Image (tube, rainbow, N blue to C red):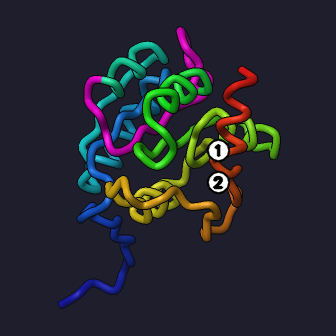
């Protein structure tokens, strides 16, 4: 007989969505916890603890997505995103910024650096699962211009590809 004492949320299992992830986070405990949650939901997660290590890991592993803290030692997350976008245009790899800063200017800076999404710590696992489950590994699918999800952990709009390319020239 089914238990009615507690309802449990079921995380989406990746089907044709993203599967291989790189997590770049310098807080070792936070990275282990997030990796555990993602692996428990069926994702393959590789962890780097600084920006340079993260950049090399992304280059060598070619993950479907990377979740990158912006305040990293060695190479910050914005510079990591810019380096990746010089090699892989928007839409080829899903880049998610992870930060403690949630002002509109912080979101704008992350998107201009080349991130597809901007999440504010502490991360809500359900919000992250939603983002990952809505994105596929098909590189022919253009990046979304607007996110339909609601809440303080989401960026509602991203700049056009031309705005992003122009802002990268300034840095």
Quarter of the picture containing the N terminus is bottom left
- Vertical comparison of 85 with 133: above or below: above
Pick whichever of labels 1 and 2 is earlier in the sequence.
Answer: 1
Res. 164 image quadrant: top right
Mark 1 lies on residue = 120
Is residue 14 found inside the magenta-colored segment of the image? no
Residue at the bottom extreme of this rendering: 1
Q: Which residues are magenta?
A: 60-77
Mark 2 lies on residue = 153
Residue at the top extreme of this rendering: 74
What residue is shown at x 33% (from left), y 41% (from top)?
Answer: 21
Q: Along the horizontal axis of the image, is 86 left or right of 166?
A: left
Quarter of the picture containing the C terminus is top right
The reply to whether callout 1 and callout 2 are in contact (CB within 8 Å) is yes
Asked which secondary structure carries label 1, the reply is strand
Mark 1, Cα crowd under 10 Å, few <14 / some 14-19 / many 20+, is many
Query: What x and y, as percent, mark residue 159?
Result: 70, 50
């Amino acid at each position: 007989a089914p238990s009615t004492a507690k309802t449990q949320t079921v995380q989406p299992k990746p089907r044709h969505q993203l599967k291989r992830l790189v997590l770049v986070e310098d807080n070792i405990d936070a990275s282990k916890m997030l990796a555990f949650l993602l692996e428990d939901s069926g994702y393959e997660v590789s962890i780097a603890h600084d920006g340079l290590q993260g950049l090399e890991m992304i280059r060598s592993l070619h993950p479907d997505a990377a979740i990158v803290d912006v305040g990293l030692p060695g190479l910050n997350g914005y510079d990591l995103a810019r380096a990746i976008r010089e090699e892989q245009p928007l839409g080829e790899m899903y880049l998610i910024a992870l930060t403690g800063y949630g002002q509109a200017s912080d979101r704008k800076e992350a998107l201009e650096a080349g991130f597809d999404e901007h999440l504010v710590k502490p991360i809500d696992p359900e919000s992250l699962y939603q983002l990952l489950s809505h994105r596929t590994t098909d590189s022919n699918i253009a990046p979304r211009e607007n996110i339909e999800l609601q809440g303080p952990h989401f960026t509602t709009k991203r700049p056009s590809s031309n705005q992003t390319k122009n802002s990268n020239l300034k840095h």
